Image (cartoon, rainbow, N blue to C red):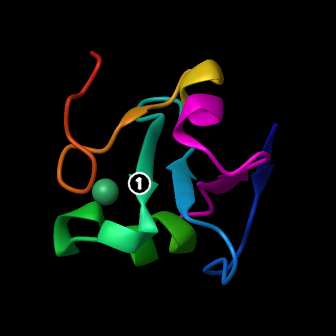
Amino acid sequence: MATSVSSRPANKRYLGNGSPTKKEVHDLQNEKTQCQIDEIIRAGHAVVFTPDTLTQAHAEGYDNGHYCIGNSRR
Ligand SMILES: [Zn+2]
């Protein structure tokens, strides 16, 4: 399940951009400037996953972030 967050999650590895035109997941342990995590949070598009796994993000239709994960599935 994906849950909206309004600030940077301290205890999660993956953060999704839930914007309908993006739907991408980012790895906070490999965060790059290009991920624009703070911008995603500010725009109100940030979501976290339960469980906190890439498999879960994929199951919810999120694609891999290009810079922090790679191998975009689109
Ligand atoms: Zn990223």
Work out whether 31 lies above or below 67: below
Q: Is mark 1 within 8 Å of ligand 1?
A: yes
Q: Specify the quadrant of the image occupied by residue 64.
A: top left
Which residue is located at x 24 percent, y 27 percent? 72
Against 17, residue 62 (above or below) is above
Q: Splitting the image into 4 quarters, where does residue 44 fall?
A: bottom right
Residue that extends furthest to the top in the rendered view of this protein = 74
Q: Position of residue 29 (x, y in %)?
A: 40, 72
How many numbered marks does the figure carry? 1
Would residue 21 be counted in the magenta stretch? Answer: no
The amino acid marked with disc number 1 is His
Q: Residue 21's spot in the image, x, y percent?
A: 43, 30
SS type, badge 1: strand
Q: Is residue 71 left or right of residue 64?
A: left
Q: Residues within 10 Å of mark 1 (few under 14, many from 20)?
A: many
Residue at position x 76%, y 56% from top?
4
Q: Quadrant of the N terminus?
A: top right
Q: Which residue is mark 1?
A: 26
The C terminus, quarter of image = top left
Residue 34 seen: yes
For the residue pair 27 and 61, the one nearer the viewer reads as 27
Q: Is residue 19 visible?
A: no
**Residue 41, located in which quarter of the rendered image?**
bottom right
Q: Which residues are magenta?
A: 43-57
Q: 64 or 18: which is nearer to us?
A: 64
Q: Is residue 56 magenta?
A: yes
Q: Residue at x 30, y 44 (%)?
A: 65
- Residue 15's spot in the image, x, y percent? 55, 58
